[in-house]
Amino acid sequence: KAGVTQTPRYLIKTRGQQVTLSCSPISGHRSVSWYQQTPGQGLQFLFEYFSETQRNKGNFPGRFSGRQFSNSRSEMNVSTLELGDSALYLCASSLRFGAGANVLTFGAGSRLTVL
Amino acid sequence: TQLLEQSPQFLSIQEGENLTVYCNSSSVFSSLQWYRQEPGEGPVLLVTVVTGGEVKKLKRLTFQFGDARKDSSLHITAAQPGDTGLYLCAGAVSDYKLSFGAGTTVTVRA
């Protein structure tokens, strides 16, 4: 079966712009989690969506937002981009809600560079 | 600060050598996962350990969960170039929160 698909894979933006990233989970998976990965910091949790509702949120500013559609596909948006937002954004899907209790399958990520 | 500290941060060894990666915390976890991430890809789950003192083997990889469920180690025997990658540990703080370490970059030279 198809894995987790993230688009776009690479993108370059300038400070102040906004960006939208997309994630299509494995068919049948209803939970989508988003993580930010930077060198030396590991994966930082952004948020988790289940059944179109945000169920959990990490410690990121309000510029980071997301949503989930009825087909479980998810998007995340970052507004007013800053240089420090440059990172690999990873999406992970699981059958049920709760990253600590379920197996996560990650996509290949979207590499965002902010100039 | 990271809830989970991984050491070493970087490890470069010759093919055939053994290596150990450590994952330590002052927090107790209900379970702990190990992932491997290759360049240009997302992390792939290798194993989940649940019980304190548990040891799991996956071919040449041996995973151990500390008795107090605060730490874990990954040992690779006779490393091969295909073992090269970023190894991440992740602890389940609760059913709803998974906390990742910063990772150990392993390079196995042929």
Image (cartoon, coloured by chain):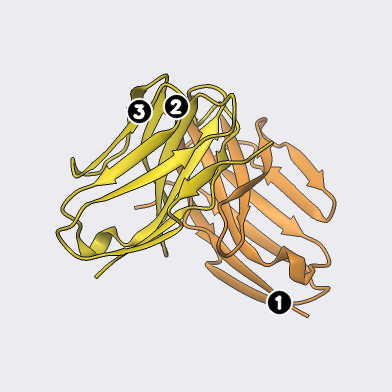
Chain colours: A yellow, B orange
Q: From the viewer's perspective, is residue B43 above or below residue B86?
A: above
Q: Toward the viewer: A91 or B74?
A: A91
Q: Where does residue A103 sit, x and y in percent of width and height?
A: 60, 32
**Tag 1–tag 2 contact (CB < 8 Å):** no
Relative to B91, A15 lies left or right:
left
- Report if residue B25 is visible in the image: no
Output the chain of dot 3. Answer: A
Q: Amino acid at mark 3?
A: Asn
Residue annotated with mark 3: A56
x 63%, y 48%: residue: B44
Say what secondary structure mark 3 lies in.
strand
Q: Choose the circle earlier in sequence order: 1 or 2.
A: 1
Q: Residue at x 73, y 57 (%)?
A: B75
Same chain under badges 3 and 1? The reply is no
Which of labels 1 and 2 is toward the front?
2
Residue topped by disc 1: B13
Q: Position of residue B62 (x, y in %)?
A: 77, 50
Residue type at the position of mark 1: Ile
Q: Secondary structure at mark 2?
A: loop
Quadrant of the rendering where the C terminus of chain B is positioned: bottom right
CA distance for labels 1 and 2: 37 Å
Q: Which residue is mark 2?
A: B96
Question: Share a chain, discs 1 and 2?
Answer: yes
> Does residue B104 appear in this view?
yes
Residue in the image at 44% along x and 36% along y: A33
Residue at figure coordinates x 19%, y 60% from the top left: A82
Q: Chain of mark 1?
A: B
Identify the disc placed on residue A114: none
Relative vertical location of residue A66 with respect to residue A71 in this rendering, above or below: below
Instruction: Kindly indicate whether the residues beneath marks 2 and 3 are on one polypeptide chain.
Output: no
Q: Nearer the viewer, residue A97 or A9?
A: A9
